[in-house]
Amino acid sequence: MTTTAKPTSTAPETLMLDIAKRHFFVETLDTRMSDGLDFHDVAVWAMRAALAEAYAAGLAAARR
């Protein structure tokens, strides 16, 4: 069994968690070793919105 190390809290990690919370209603992006907690049904429109927001954030960061 492999365990995923918890990532350090960085600005990109914080942004990804914020996007995931708002679009997918998840509490954490940490692996919890439980199918019920680690896998989620996601609507394609929610996925599209989250990806668009992440892309826009990347563009904004690159322009700074």
Image (cartoon, grey):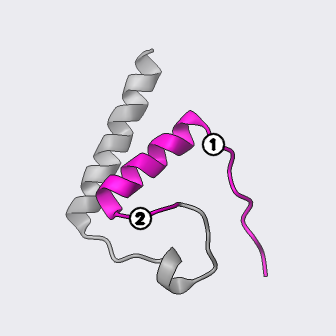
Whole-percent x, y for residue 48 in the image = 26, 55
Under circle 1, the secondary element is loop
Q: What residue does disc 1 label? A: 9
Question: What span is colored magenta in the figure?
Answer: 1-28
Q: Is residue 38 above or below residue 21?
A: below
Q: Earlier in the sequence, mark 2 or mark 1?
A: 1
Whole-percent x, y for residue 34 in the image = 58, 83
Whole-percent x, y for residue 4 in the image = 72, 65
46 lies left or right of 13: left
Q: Is residue 60 above or below residue 8?
A: above
10 magenta-colored: yes
Quadrant that contains the N terminus: bottom right
Label 2 to label 1: alpha-carbon separation = 17 Å
Residue at horizontal 46 percent and vertical 41 percent from the top: 15
55 lies left or right of 33: left
53 lies left or right of 16: left
Whole-percent x, y for residue 11 in the image = 55, 34
Quarter of the image for residue 31 reads: bottom right
Residue at horizontal 31 percent and vertical 42 percent from the top: 53
Residue lying at the far right in this picture: please name it.
1
5 lies left or right of 49: right
Q: What residue does disc 2 label? A: 26
Under circle 2, the secondary element is loop
